[in-house]
Image: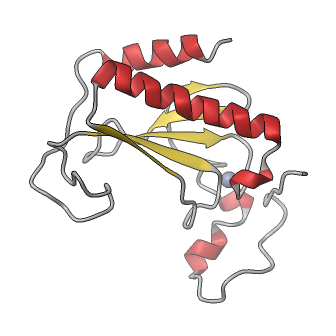
């Protein structure tokens, strides 16, 4: 199946109730994941990248993003689907190895930014929303900071694992 791209192709159909902001994001030139203002890239190749979201509440929140603008996971070829899920897997496993979190949350929405990407979030019982989703009701916890040297270790580990 040919990949759908929106670079020169504004969405022609869709819900009428979407705001002007949401609709404008469907145009590739305005897509914040196609043309990010600023990103803290942990790893990247020609196909995808892993970034730190730099979220104050969730300082270890990572995102796996395809470099090309696809709207839905099923727009990718079978090879690309395997490749991107392997990146998600490596990020999840490495977070577990380095941090031993209570749980790792993996989410893909794309309602506001319809560009294929995954949120990969290590969760801890002491974090600000546990056991709720990070977008859910706040609980008593506090942001969990990474240990010293974490980002260097994380970067080196996923680089090594994804080099093959
Ligand atoms: Zn995009």
Using the image, determine if residue 159 lies above or below residue 119. above
131 relative to 77 in the view: left or right: left
Q: Nearer the viewer, residue 41 or 110?
A: 110
Residue visible at 36% across and 26% down? 96
76 relative to 73 in the view: left or right: right
Please give the count of numbered marks on the rendered protein: 0
Residue 43, position in %: x, y?
55, 24
104 relative to 118 in the view: left or right: left
Residue 118, position in %: x, y?
54, 46
The quarter of the picture where residue 160 lies is: top right
Residue 9 visible to an observer of this rendering: yes
Using the image, determine if residue 145 lies above or below residue 98. below
Residue 94, position in %: x, y?
43, 22
Residue visible at 66% across and 49% down? 34
Q: Nearer the viewer, residue 102 or 51?
A: 102
The quarter of the picture where residue 8 lies is: bottom right
Q: Nearer the viewer, residue 5 or 74?
A: 74
Using the image, determine if residue 143 lies above or below residue 87. below
The quarter of the picture where residue 72 lies is: bottom right
Residue 154, position in %: x, y?
41, 19
Residue visible at 54% across and 59% down? 109
Q: Residue furthest bottom?
A: 16
Q: Residue furthest left?
A: 140
Residue visible at 25% across and 48% down? 57
Using the image, determine if residue 59 lies above or below residue 151. below
Residue 37 visible to an observer of this rendering: no
């Amino acid at each position: 199946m040919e990949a759908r791209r929106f670079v020169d192709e504004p969405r022609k159909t869709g819900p009428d109730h979407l705001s002007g902001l949401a609709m404008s994001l469907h145009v590739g030139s305005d897509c914040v994941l196609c043309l990010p203002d600023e990103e803290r890239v942990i790893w990247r190749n020609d196909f995808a990248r892993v970034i730190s979201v730099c979220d104050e509440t969730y300082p270890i929140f990572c995102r796996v993003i395809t470099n090309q603008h696809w709207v839905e996971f099923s727009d990718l070829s079978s090879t690309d689907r395997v490749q991107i899920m392997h990146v998600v897997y490596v990020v999840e496993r490495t977070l577990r190895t380095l941090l031993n979190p209570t749980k790792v949350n993996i989410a893909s929405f794309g309602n506001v930014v319809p560009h294929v990407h995954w949120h990969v979030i290590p969760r801890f019982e002491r974090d600000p929303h546990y056991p709720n989703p990070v977008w859910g009701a706040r609980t008593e916890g506090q942001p969990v900071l990474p240990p010293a040297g974490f980002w260097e270790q994380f970067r080196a580990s996923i680089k090594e694992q994804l080099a093959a």
